[in-house]
Amino acid sequence: MPGVQHLIDFVLNEVALRGNQGATLSDLLQAIDDFHAQTPEINQNIDHRFKSKIWSWLTTNPEVSIGQHNKWNHLTLSEAEQLDSRKTERDDPEVNQTADETPDSPPLRIFVSEERTWVAITGHPPDESKVLPLEFVLLSVIASRRSKGIVQPELVKLSGQDKRSVPKRTDALQRKGYIDKRPVQTKTARTSLCTLQRFYRHTTSVQTKEEPQSKNMIDFDSFNSSLFNILREHQLIARNDLKQLLGFDDHWRWKVLSRALRKWERIGVVQRVRAESQYERMHPCVKLLRDPSEQDLALFHEFNFDVLNKHGVRSKGPRLTPDRDHSMEVEGPSKRSPSPEDGRMDLIKEHVGESARIVPSWTPDRNLNNQIFDIIQSTGTTGITNQASTSSKK
């Protein structure tokens, strides 16, 4: 029965992609459904009886272990479902209070041979000279997330490895070509999204509701592609319109956009300006100065705010704070906010003024301490705020 053999191979491969942590019973049963969903030409009634038959073939396969060391290979599917149900109940604190079994009993897991697991995840037989043991643990967790990928903080938690070591190991896996690792922004932090290379697919510049951008994550590669496609088309665009076109409709995304624009401005690719609309109001806008180069993109992806100044010296820009980001986001037109009847603003590009200038960087030929002293001394008894002193540095 070629169809059944293909099904068995498909299920074994799906279990192998779960790596060292193994597949759950529901994962295995779902794989049977997925196979027939992908092969509609096979007319088969996918009922419990059919799945029980597939289960019996799997449990007699020498590559398959139900639990560790074939502990539960003797069970029928119905018995396995009952056992898995009891183990799931013990994970519930309320049910666990009346459970007779040990509360730390692990859930039912299905494993395949090491050979098949390595081939499914890495594409080659076991070889610790290519993938170190701790790297393979990470690779197994990454593979289990398929095309969705996994953010690095969650990878640290699930793998149980030191948070200082995981970034280095994922960098190594990326260099070896096993995973794709790209910068993303979640609601709480900027981090990296790791995806097994075979599942990685490039996100397009147009994001749909199902894409990570529309949920709890921003993919910076896709974000920058969308951002500069919009800026190339408009050259000058109101920030509110830019938010709308990007689909950034909540506060945390606004803050990410604000930081990104500020960083691109510091690099010298865009400029934040004010432009007059057809209603004679000045609106905060973004102006494209030039297309970003590969070096610009590399600078943007650095986690700190380092850029190259005009002398080619790497220097730190001003630290961004949530308060300053928020003030940029709530900044509106100089007269009143546009009403819904206004529609999108037609900007008069002849009436454009700077709303923020690029902060000059410190240069080696002038001592920074002396520079700060001169600025403060020039204000006399009036004094100067920290923010004003930053904008006064020359």
Image (cartoon, grey):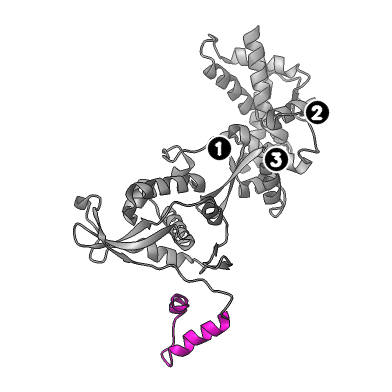
**Residue topped by disc 1:** 148
Q: Residue at x 47, y 78 (%)?
A: 386
State which region is magenta: 367-394
Q: Is residue 266 left or right of residue 332?
A: right
Label 3 crowd bin: few (<14), some (14–19), many (20+), radius 10 Å: few
Mark 3 residue element = loop
Residue 82 in view here: no
Mark 2 residue element = helix
Rendered location of residue 21, percent (x, y): 70, 35
Question: What is the C-alpha distance between the residues marked 3 and 1?
Answer: 21 Å
Rendered location of residue 381, percent (x, y): 43, 93
Q: Are marks 2 and 3 in contact (CB under 8 Å)?
A: no
Which disc, if any, is residue 69?
Answer: 2
Q: Are marks 1 and 2 in contact (CB under 8 Å)?
A: no
Type of amino acid under label 3: Lys
Q: Is residue 387 magenta?
A: yes
Viewer-closest of 275 and 37: 275
Which disc, if any, is residue 176?
Answer: 3
Viewer-closest of 34 and 359: 359
